[in-house]
Image (tube, rainbow, N blue to C red):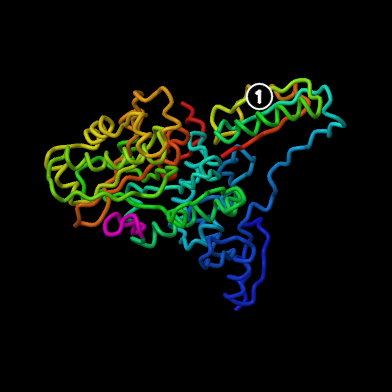
Amino acid sequence: MTFRVLDPTAEKAPPAGKAAPRLASLEGKTIGFISNGKEGTKGFFRHLDRMLREEHGVAKVVSRTKSNYSAPADAGIVAEIKSWDAVVSGIGD
Amino acid sequence: MQLASRTYDANDISAVQELYHSSGWTDGLPIVPPTAEAVEACLEWAMMPPDQLIGIEPVRGLAITAEKLAINAVMAGCLPMHFPVVLTAWTAMMQDEFLMHGATASTGGCAVLVVLNGPIRLELGASGTFNALGNSDRATAVIGRAIRLCLINLMDVRPGVIDRSTLGHPGKFSFCLAEDEEDSAWLPLHEQRGIERAASAVTVMAAGAPRQIMNEWTTRPEEILETFAAEMRANLRHYSIYPGNYAIIIPKQLREHLQAAGWTKTDIAAFIHERARIHRREWAEVGKGAVVRDRGDSVYPAMERPDQLLVIAAGGPAGGFGAIVPPWLGHKSRAVTLAVGACVDCEPPKK
């Protein structure tokens, strides 16, 4: 017996975000960190902050932490992103 | 009825199973082939067109349609009469306060506990007695399984993809129970949570695995409930201090002692709210001294308010057992109760 069966998946991909233009250099740039606030993010971002400033000439690092680590970033943080040259979003368990 | 989903032809039932397993579309168990006829029967039962939008998942923007829910419900073993419950549970899960993406993606590994109330339990043969938290009956088994298959296939909540659970628990196969309203003097859960008693309703909760308790050596309500509260205190110590919705399941033997003493669900919740709380310093006793810091005297209740406790009458007639079902992460996800057939976003009728 032949079966004709249906695809159970969404089929449509979720609306894709568009990647921002890549930076040619980090020199003099402002980089934002968005942390989910978990313990593991602290050492990671501390280290990355130092690396970016000392080894890549980043001018400014802005650190923000989500109020709920299981939910999307707060609207206030998302609104700030446009004033940064790049953003690093980190999940640390 | 015009279905939009892509179709596949398979030569026999084994080929169907291999197609679905190899595509990552199952929970590891065999599925019922979702043919157009079976899917249309579900949609017709619920009186929904295939493209009916049930909601848009807010984090990744995925549209959830009735057709896709029906396909997964059929795969789980649902008959058309089960489908309205699946639709209602999904509508409830898509409310903001449930935080579906966070709850189902989390390393915390929770499952969606689905509680059925009202006359639909009887129509479906959903049993709230023997083995209530296990394989008690067909209806709760397939409805609970449908919730998981929909998560897997519609939101990519596959292990290692969106589902980042460290451990998960067996309720992720199916985690649905019906309240034993016929053998209880208490208000059913849905009425306790503001729905008309005559309506059928579904409550969803982002839930950890059940933890069973036993106390058959007393008839005093305070002592019985102290055992439940102790297990909740253990959860606050060993797992998470976040307050929120806990469920407690009280089977008949313990229920009769509570009811004989005149205790209502509201009385039970008030007592548990007082007793299920710990001091932060207790974390030091279970190896978590590093996070006590200077707040050892702070008190953490399991619930912010007594009405966050979901008291459910269910279980077989004998045995001094009960269970608590802890929340995934307390205040981050709230239990949601919706009437079956209710329209969440409808405009109120014009006068």
Looking at the rendering, the stretch of residues picked out in magenta corresponds to B123-134
Q: Position of residue A18 (x, y in %)?
A: 77, 37
Residue B312 rendering spot, x and y as whole percentages: 29, 45
Give the structural element (helix, strand or loop) at label 1.
strand
Residue B103 location in percent, x, y?
51, 42
**Which image quadrant for residue A90?**
top right
Q: Residue at x 23, y 43 (%)?
A: B227
Residue at label 1?
Answer: A63
Note whether residue B294 is visible. yes
Q: Indicate whether B13 appears above or below B303.
A: below
- Amino acid type, label 1: Ser
Rendered location of residue B191, percent (x, y)? 31, 38
Image height check: is A21 above or below B23?
A: above
Position of A16 compared to B295: left or right? right
Instruction: Please state which of residues B330 and B297 is positioned toward the viewer in this rendering.
Output: B297
Chain under callout 1: A
**Other-residue count near label 1 (Cα within 10 Å), few / some / many at <14 / 14–19 / ≥20:** some
